[in-house]
Each structure stands twice: as C-alpha cells, then as structure tokens.
Image: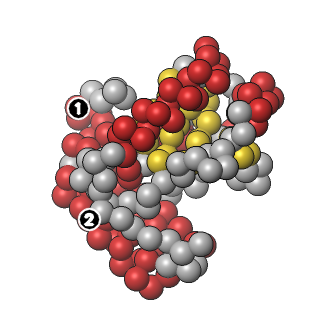
Amino acid sequence: MQIKIDNYKEEWPEDFEVIQADLSRILGPLALRVDHIGSTSVPGLGAKDVIDVQITVRELSEEIIRRLVDAEYVYWESISEDHVPQGEDDNPKLWKKLLFVEPPGRRRANIHVRIDGNRNQHYALLFRDYLRAHPNSAASIEMIKREIVKRHADDRETYYDIKDPVYDLIWDAAKTWSTLTDWTPN
C-alpha cells in the first residue's frame, strides 16, 4: 500500500473518540488510559489518515490480546517493540508493546498497547504534547514526511528508516522542553 500524507482533518479527534470508547468498553479496567497519539493527534499537522491510539496498561497480558482479538482487532504479533531513539536505554523490556489494527471494515487505526511508565509509553505522550506546543516543529515534521513520500511512497522500510532518526531529533528537544516546563501528560 502506498504511503500518502493528507492535510490535517478536523474529524480526526472525533474519530479517535469513537475508537477510544470502543477500546475502553472492551478492556475496562485493564486500560489505565487510552490516548490519541501520533501525527493525527496534533492539530494542524498533516499525516497518514490512520488514527494512532496508545492504550496504557500495567502489563502486556494474554487477557488483553484475547479481548481485543475477540472484538476483531487484528493482532500484529510480528511487531513487538518500538524504535529506540539514539542515546536511550536499549533494554528491550522498555520498548516492548502489543500492536493491533482496526477490525475489518472499520476506520483505519493502529492500536499500540504499552506498559505504564516504560520509555515507549512516555515517548508517545511527550512527543505528541511537544508537537502540540511547538507548531513550527510540527510543520517541519510534516514537510519532511511529505518529502520522504515524494521519493519513497511505495517503500515503507525506507520511509521509516529516514523518518525515525528525524523523530529522534525532536525527541531530544522534547525531553529538554519537558524538564523546563515540568511537563506531565494530559
């Protein structure tokens, strides 16, 4: 499938709310929080038309997998950890996750299940909040993604090989910003 970056869509937050309600119903208290993350969660930022959702949990359990699969979410067992930014502790336990996509016929979504307090759980929220607070950085991210897609729309691996190090640059700035502002996730 070809990668395409769309202009920001005003309906993305509402689309997330529908997905959030479904996931909260399915997981109940297993979900400590369900957050809209990724580019579609940043007002004004163009992105792939896929809603990224993070479910924060105490542990990655078989019960979570069973409930989501029973609700027809598609489990991507082959993706079990996140990209580790340069300079971060590369202990795989800190970057472990479960990944699901939407049930067949539903609105496109990537559902990332991560452990509360792990680096990857923190990363998704801080990255989102930093871009919300820094529209010039968000615009730069969009411009870079559009340029990558111009050259590699049919090559997902190359797209992410280029995008991930760019995000590492933003990650460093976001970490500094978080200490200066006493950031806590919304």
- Spatial distance from mark 1 to mark 2, Cα to Cα? 22 Å
Q: Residue lying farthest bottom?
A: 151
User: Is 128 situated left or right of 74 in this image?
Assistant: left
Which residue type does callout 2 highlight?
Ser
Q: Nearer the viewer, residue 22 or 35?
A: 22
Is residue 39 visible in the rendered image? The answer is: yes
What kind of colouring is applied to the model shown? secondary structure
Q: Position of residue 72 (x, y in %)?
A: 72, 39
Q: Position of residue 66 (x, y in %)?
A: 79, 30
User: Is 53 situated left or right of 68 in this image?
Assistant: left
Which quadrant would residue 68 be assigned to in this image? top right
Disc on the earlier residue, 1 or 2: 2
Kindly identify the residue that appears in the image at 29 percent across and 56 percent down: 8
Is residue 128 visible in the rendered image? The answer is: no
Q: In the figure, 109 relative to 157: above or below? A: above
Secondary structure under the numbered disc 2 in the rendered image: helix
Residue on which disc 2 sits? 140
Residue on which disc 1 sits? 181
Q: In the figure, 36 relative to 184: above or below? A: below
Disc 2 crowd rating (10 Å Cα; few below 14, some 14-19, many 20+) is few
Disc 1 crowd rating (10 Å Cα; few below 14, some 14-19, many 20+) is few
Q: Position of residue 70 (x, y in %)?
A: 77, 32
Kindly identify the residue that appears in the image at 40 percent across and 82 percent down: 150
Which residue type does callout 1 highlight?
Thr
Secondary structure under the numbered disc 1 in the rendered image: helix
